[in-house]
Image (cartoon, rainbow, N blue to C red):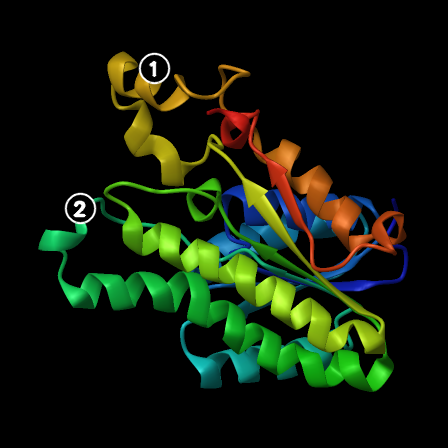
Amino acid sequence: MNLDGRIALVTGASRGIGRAIAETYADAGADVALLARDADALAETAAIVEATGQRALVLPCDVTDAAAVQAAVAGAVEGLGPPDVVVNNAGGNSFSMPLSGMRFSGWEKTLRLNLDSVVHVCQAVLPHMLERRTGSIINVSSVAGLQGAPLMSHYGAAKAAVISLTQSLALETAWAGIRVNALVPGWVETDLTDFLRVSDETEQGALARVPMARWGQVSEIAQPALFLASDASSFMTGQVLVVDGGLSAMP
């Protein structure tokens, strides 16, 4: 599982899972283009990547903006070369609410961040991959997209759509040697899940249905992401790799 000589592009690379994936890819030999909105946080990730001896390119970008994504990908190609691996990791959820009381603007914002951003990035990188007849695209979904997500229907719907998009795109591009897979984390200890650790009661409630009875660590998501990027998964496309401590297996 090495990425020697390859170029990776990771969105949401300023923190959490995205930062861990960028570092893991660099450790495996890849140069990494880093996309997120926070330039200062991206610079911190870049320093981690460069400490491994690999090149890092900071590309501040709002992935919900199609034109900004096109410009960032063009910058990555100019600065590092066409990407061999693309990780659509940017996403998140900022609120919980029953659908009956949800403002549609909140629904739209969540889908723009978690679904439209994936489309923007794929449309920007695919011409380069199709021309070279190679590439691995990894779309980060969530266990919320595998089953009902009460009070988070907006987030669950977006992440379920990411899985469907992944499988459709895999079928569209397999002829060209491009692999497209979904990586599905469960509850992972990042600042995005801090709200579930505000009290022992809240945390215990979140972990009650996780058979392994603990939070996942970002490194435990980054290693499967390395598998999907590398030749170790060379005959794998259109698949959904779930890394959730057994949560989705619960009845």
Tell which of 89 and 169 is nearer to you.
169
**Pointer 1 residue:** 204
Tell which of 206 and 11 is nearer to you.
206
Q: Is residue 63 left or right of residue 85?
A: left
**Pointer 2 residue:** 97
* Residue at (59% x, 50% y) in the render: 45
Mark 1 surroundings: few (<14), some (14-19) or many (≥20) residues within 10 A: some
Q: Position of residue 195 (x, y in %)?
A: 28, 32
Q: Against 118, is 78 above or below?
A: below
The amino acid marked with disc number 1 is Gln
Q: Quadrant of residue 178?
A: bottom right
Mark 2 surroundings: few (<14), some (14-19) or many (≥20) residues within 10 A: some
Find the distance from the CA under tag 1 to the CA under tag 2. Answer: 21 Å
Q: Position of residue 139 (x, y in %)?
A: 59, 58
- Label 1 secondary element: helix
Q: Is residue 75 visible?
A: no
Q: Position of residue 225 (x, y in %)?
A: 70, 47
Q: Quadrant of residue 197?
A: top left
